Every structure is written in C-alpha cells, then in structure tokens.
Image (cartoon, coloured by chain):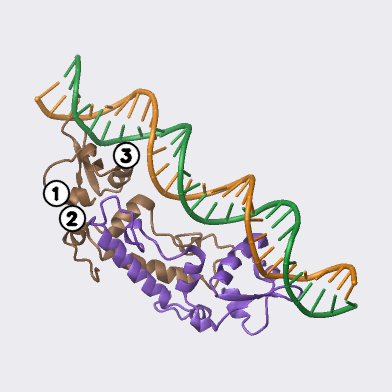
Chain colours: A brown, B purple, C green, D orange
Amino acid sequence: MIYLAQHEGEGPQPLKNIAELGMPDQYLEQLLGNLRRAGLVTTVRGAQGGYQLSRSADEITARHIIEAMEGPLNLSECVGEAGHTCPRGGQCTARGVWAYLTDEINGLLDGITLSNMLKNDIKGDM
Amino acid sequence: MIYLAQHEGEGPQPLKNIAELGMPDQYLEQLLGNLRRAGLVTTVRGAQGGYQLSRSADEITARHIIEAMEGPLNLSECVGEAGHTCPRGGQCTARGVWAYLTDEINGLLDGITLSNMLKNDIKGDM
DNA sequence: CGAAATCCGATAAGATTAGTCGGAATTGGA
DNA sequence: TCCAATTCCGACTAATCTTATCGGATTTCG
C-alpha cells in the first residue's frame, strides 16, 4: 500500500513492480486480492493493467488496511461481534481488558493514514 | 493470574483449583512455568503446595504478564531490539508505524494492573 | 491473435500455539 | 519412614494460522 501511495497518479502498477523488494509475486497477488475485495485498491486487467489506490492516500488508514487483510482486530473471542464464545458465559473478569485494548488500538490505527506514513509524521514517531 | 489475585493471601493455590474453569491442567502447568520464571508467581512444591502471586496485585501489569508469556511485544521484526532483520536495511517507510504502535500499546499495557482488572476500573472500560 | 496482466480455487509447506505424556523431584503428614 | 499431593521438566503430538506455490482461466491492449 505504501508503494501504491508513492506511485499515486501514475496509473496502474503491475504486480511485478510492487513485488520488487523481495516478496513472491504470486503471494502478493493473493494479498492484493484482499485489498481489492475490501475496496482499498482498484485494478485494471489485461496488458498495461495493474493496481492502484481506490481513493486518496489520506483517506486510507492503517485500520482499513489491517481489517482488509486480517478482519476486525480480535484480541480475544470474548469481545468480538455477536455470540462471543466465552466459556464463562460472557462475564469473565478479563473481558473488560480485552474490550478496552481493542478500542484503544483501533483508535490508534484510525489515526494513521497512508499519507502520514509517507510523510513520516506519525504522532510520536521515533 | 486473575484467579491468583482473587485468592491473594490465602496461601498457595494448587494447579487443580486454578484449572477448574475448563482448561487442561497439564497445559496450565506449562503456562504457570513461564509466569514463575518471569518472577510473577512463586510456588511451593509438595503436598499443600501451589502457586501464588509473588507481589501485590497492583504491582503486576498486563504488560508484565504478556511479556512473561510471549516475550516483548513484537509487531514487526523491523522494530525489535538489536539487528532488526528488515530486508530493506532498516529504513523502510513502515518502520515508524510499527515503532509508534509498539510504544503506544506497551503504554496501554503498563497502565493496567491486576487490581484494576479485579475492580473492573480499566480506564475507558465498557 | 498474442502477450501482458489480473483473477481464482486448491493445495502444500512452515511456523506458531495448544495440548499430551511420562516421569523426576519435593514436601507435609500419618 | 513411607505415602500422597504437588510442582517441575523435556520431549513429543496435534491443531491452527500464516506464508507460499501451482495450474490454469479470464481480460485487455496493440
């Protein structure tokens, strides 16, 4: 995604270009499939085709990317959507902790956009 | 650890008690080994033996526990200790993000103690 | 039509996490 | 002193998740 952001406006980037820095292209292709299905990248098939961001780099957050790749942050079964399958019927003491952490981390991820990454202005960057 | 905190001051708790709520005791034993080696619990061997917190529940944080179990938080090889094995020589654009997140999450974990968990007064609890 | 690409489902390989096994060592109490 | 309760330990197995590979089908430009 950083690569695509860096080449924003240059038209579709073929897989092979993106894979340059040492990752198997057939695997990358699979990963890009997730990003496409999540609506973060659009593709052009056929010759001269490739991948590009579906919207501006400052409208794509780390959370968008992570959720596209791995689904919603799930620190514990306890806290997930419906029917959290906690063996203790859903009221174990740890649950509040997981819920809190999930919220906070999602908040952090919401606060990071692709543009931030490019400009290296992540809040608190070291 | 929550169980042990709940039984603070009641002397060593044998494995079997702790395992009550549906987790295989031989596995739990293994996990408690990590906590012991990390200095979070002390043990008494032999009859009437068992496990107990090595210090007060408000001096044990979520971070202590997680690091005891899984080692230091490692969101990406990029950011770890020495010789981060980033294929891009250690200066990829994503690195700042990982470093930032690692710091922030460690901060969150530092802010949660076992006492907090018992009292359910996690900041921002839902 | 042919080459450059993405798309797709299935499968394999590797790594991590979860769990099992068998027994050794320690300790309190009868 | 012996027995039962209990932790300790290393090795192994099983399950799950991540990473990667394979073989082709489809689309599109020139």
Quarter of image, res B10: bottom right
Between tags 2 and 3, which lies in front?
A: 3
Identified at 38% across, 52% down, the residue is A70
Query: Label 3: which residue?
Result: A24
Between disc 1 and disc 3, whose residue precedes? 1
Query: Label 1: which residue?
Result: A8
Indicate the secondary structure of the residue bearing disc 2.
helix
Residues at marks 1 and 3 on the same chain: yes
Quarter of image, res B54: bottom right
Q: CA distance from mark 2 to mark 1?
A: 8 Å
Q: CA distance from mark 1 to mark 3?
A: 23 Å
Identified at 28% across, 44% down, the residue is A36
State the residue in front, B76 or A41: B76
In the visual, does B64 lie left or right of B22?
left
**Do the numbered discs 2 and 1 sit on residues whose CB atoms are within 8 Å?**
yes
Give the residue type at disc 3.
Pro
Residue B36 coordinates in the image, percent (x, y): 58, 71
Tell which subunit mark 1 falls on.
A
Query: Label 2: which residue?
Result: A57
